Image: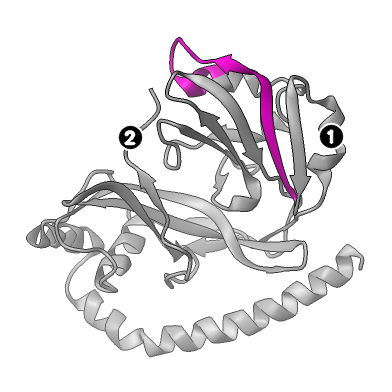
Amino acid sequence: MDFKKIQIIFLIIFVMIDVFLFSLFRENSHLQTENSNQGSDTEIIKQMQNDQITVAPKLYTSGQTGYYLSAVNDDTLNNDVNKLSNQKVTYANHILRSTFKRPIGLYSGDYHDILDKLMKKSTFVSHGTEYEYNSDLSTKNSIVYSQKTSDGLLYGTKHGQITFDISNDHLLQGYTQSYMNDVSILREKTDIISPAKALVWLYQYNEIPDNSKIKWVRLYYTQLLSIKNNIVLIPTWVIGYTTSDSSSVVSKRINAFNGAILDSSSSTQSATKSN
């Protein structure tokens, strides 16, 4: 099926989604009206302290813009396998898994500083310059790089990530990689809600427990839906927080176009970062 036909399918789906989200918005309009009467987003964030919820990042209240994007999950990585060196590679379901024949020592400096230099080598990873270190998803033994958009934003989706496996003795053992190809804009630029608004709505949806600490609020492009190997991405506010009884970071996703909570798995990451 050519790309033009795929676009037509996507547009039909978008219409269906827009109708659904509009109906959802109408159902929540009463709640949002009540919320607006309680004060500005900044005031509500301050009120969160009454529930022992602290907000570490400084959030702005002005809006930004975003796109609907499409991408293809194809076999590009498999076509580049022969360029890799010092690696035993397997490939299945668009996922490349690599084990280094000779593990690489990461003994000095931050792990990601060393990896940043290695990522520029086509013999180390394929399309390495299209990825960027993702501190939100990285831990001491698992360093994550995410594909980045032309605007420098990251894709918060498993389809565009590299996860490096680091042993306790500072050895780079291997990595798992996925890659999104032919990323393109499906719809014109549209206003999105602010990060402050996203946090307020998440709080008012009772998605943030008491005695929590908001660690970060980031704008990512994440998967909305997929059809075979074609993926639709939307701007998404991803909010990470910890609770008083756990050092793990729980993340929640909010559709940046309309503030709807996305049914993603709330992923959990260790709060311990790389050295």
Q: Kindly give the residue lying farthest to the left in the view shown.
A: 50
Q: Secondary structure at mark 2?
A: loop
Q: Is residue 178 visible?
A: yes
Q: Quadrant of the N terminus?
A: bottom right
- In the rendered image, residue 100 lying in the magenta stretch gets the answer yes
**Helix, strand or loop under label 1:** loop
Please state which of residues 142 and 210 is positioned toward the viewer in this rendering. 142
> Residue at horizontal 82%, vertical 48%?
75
The crowding category of the residue bearing disc 1, from other C-alpha atoms within 10 Å (few below 14, some 14 to 19, many at least 20), is some
Q: How far apart, in angstroms, are the residues tagged by discs 2 and 1?
A: 34 Å
Which residue corresponds to the image point at 42% horizontal and 70% vertical from the top-left?
259
> Which residue is under mark 2?
272
Q: Percent x, y for residue 177?
A: 66, 40
| Res 91 quadrant in image | top right
Q: Is 231 covered by the magenta stretch?
A: no
Residue at the limit of the structure toward the top, as seen here: 108
Residue 110 coordinates in the image, percent (x, y): 44, 18
* Colour scheme in use: one colour
Placement of 274 over or under 191, stated as above or below: above
Residue bearing the label numbered 1: 80
**Residue density around tag 2, few if under 14, some if 14–19, many if 20 or more, within 10 Å:** few
**Mark closer to the chain start, 2 or 1:** 1
Q: Determine which quarter of the picture holds residue 266.
A: bottom left
Task: Identify which residue is drawn at 56% across, 32% down.
Answer: 164
Q: Which residues are magenta?
A: 94-114
